[in-house]
Image (tube, helix red, strand yellow):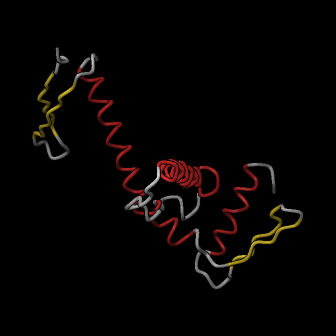
């Protein structure tokens, strides 16, 4: 015996006051608008995943063993979370606040410089002053340290 399949034809007005149509096929036992919200949330997640793949250069996963695949998935999740948390932790109020993952990786997180450690603890970040984003990034790094009371 198969599952019950509900089908809906949805219609709404767009910003130009023209009708837009979509179909929704589902086996979920929820009211139609609840299902539509679930579907819309899925679309947002797919957009984030596509953006991450582009920004982190993750177009293909070429790991052949299951352990390597699982490790790669965990690492990409960590990278995604770090990029997502950068904005509230250190980029809020800066010119970088609207940067997407690709721009963060290509333009911001690869500013040349040097890291200094003492006893295994990061003590100084020296960015090249010639980089166009160095001055504002320095302020963002201070915001990050202040967020965690490390300033």
Split into 4 quadrants, where in the image is the N terminus?
A: top left
- On screen, residue 67 versus residue 122, left or right, reads left
Percent x, y of residue 144: 70, 56
- The part of the image, by quadrant, that contains residue 117 is bottom right
Is 75 rendered above or below residue 59?
Answer: above
Is 27 rendered above or below residue 117?
Answer: above
- On screen, residue 77 versus residue 111, left or right, reads left
Extreme top residue here? Answer: 1
Extreme right residue here? Answer: 119
Residue displayed at 40% across by 50% down: 48
Split into 4 quadrants, where in the image is the C terminus?
A: bottom right
Residue displayed at 76% across by 53% down: 146
Percent x, y of residue 66: 47, 48
- On screen, residue 88 versus residue 44, left or right, reads right
Is 31 rendered above or below residue 60?
Answer: above
Percent x, y of residue 110: 58, 73
Residue displayed at 75% across by 56% down: 145
Q: How many labels does the image show?
A: 0
Extreme bottom residue here? Answer: 130
- The part of the image, by quadrant, that contains residue 128 is bottom right
């Amino acid at each position: 015996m198969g599952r019950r399949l509900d089908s809906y034809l949805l219609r709404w007005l767009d910003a130009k006051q023209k009708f837009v149509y979509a179909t929704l096929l589902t086996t979920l036992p929820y009211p139609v608008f609840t299902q539509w919200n679930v579907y819309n949330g899925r679309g947002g997640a797919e957009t984030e995943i596509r953006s991450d793949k582009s920004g982190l250069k993750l177009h293909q996963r070429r790991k052949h063993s299951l352990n390597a695949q699982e490790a790669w998935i965990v690492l990409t999740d960590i990278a995604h979370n770090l990029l997502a948390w950068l904005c509230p932790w250190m980029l809020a109020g800066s010119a970088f606040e609207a940067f997407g993952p690709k721009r963060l990786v290509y333009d911001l997180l690869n500013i040349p410089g040097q890291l200094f450690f003492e006893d295994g603890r990061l003590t100084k970040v020296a960015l090249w002053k010639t980089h166009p984003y160095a001055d504002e990034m320095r302020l963002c790094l201070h915001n990050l340290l202040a967020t965690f009371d490390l300033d």
